[in-house]
Image: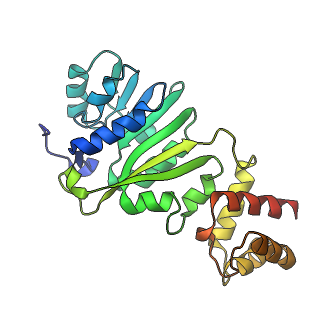
Amino acid sequence: MSRFPGRHEFGQNFLVDPVVIAGISRLVAATDGPILEIGPGDGALTQPLSSLGRPITAVEIDPRRAKRLAEHLPSHVTVLNEDILFHRLRGEVGAVVGNVPFHITTATLRWLLAAPRWRTAVLLVQWEVARRRAGIGGASLLTARVWPWFDFTVHSRVSKRAFRPVPTVDGGLLVVHRRPTPLVTDRDAYQRFVHTVFTGRGYGLREILTRAAGVPTPVAREWLRTHRVPPTALPRDLTAEQWASLWSTARRR
């Protein structure tokens, strides 16, 4: 149990379920290289991860907890009293792991997906956020913008009773892998295209593509038919591979 109660301004809901902790540890153990931990809190994950013997950088915004962790962890664990949103990765990182404070989930994901030199992320976030990021039930704009470079998978659902204090919603274990070979090479142009399509007006993709994105009607119709996408489907319904193919088609035209 935590020595200090969670602080509201830090969004602290501490992970206490040993089964969930062990599951996250196994996922990280399957990677290699240095580890970056987001918001270690009282070290529920840091302690078992330290047994791997790999270099760990634990970034904790709460100065009390950062100080206490630094005093009780082995020398290959470095504790930094920093805001993760302003942290700069140093060198290669094999795995990013963390119980992400729910109120900064989107900001943390934006920071992470813009950061270089990490390969795998194992993140505990809100259940619905995990589903949306993985494209289950419809992908978000954020996911579609970065899908060609990252693969998102929901590993499991985590009961809200696994946390103290107990939050109002369940968590979800989201695993993100950087693709060794991106599906798209021109990041800026692709992301502008995705934003145009996601925010464009029209009754379904066929109208959006022709009205907002400037794709000729015969080309849009043929792409939808080839990929078995209904004309009334929405941008959120596409997969990573379909977005890459759609961009390639639109760019040629």
Q: Nearer the viewer, residue 118 or 239?
A: 239
Query: Which residue appears farthest toward the top when viewing the image?
Result: 75
Quarter of the image where one finds residue 102: bottom left
Residue at point 52%, 51% (across, down): 152
**135 on left or right of 100:** right
**247 on left or right of 169:** right
Q: Quadrant of the C terminus?
A: bottom right
**122 on left or right of 160:** right
Quarter of the image where one finds residue 167: bottom left
Residue at point 58%, 35% (across, down): 116
Give the image location of residue 51, x and y in percent.
31, 23
| Total tally of numbered discs in the picture | 0
Residue 88 visible (yes or no): no
Q: How is the image coloured?
A: rainbow
Q: Nearer the viewer, residue 64 or 140?
A: 140
Give the image location of residue 2, x and y in percent.
14, 39
**141 on left or right of 82:** right
Residue 247 visible (yes or no): yes
Please determine whether, in this image, residue 40 is positioned above or below residue 195. above
Residue at point 60%, 70% (across, down): 237
Give the image location of residue 24, x and y in percent.
35, 40
Give the image location of residue 43, x and y in percent.
25, 33
Residue at point 69%, 41% (across, down): 181
Q: Nearer the viewer, residue 136 or 90?
A: 136
Q: Quadrant of the N terminus?
A: top left
Please determine whether, in this image, residue 101 is positioned above or below residue 26. below
Q: Nearer the viewer, residue 52 or 195?
A: 52
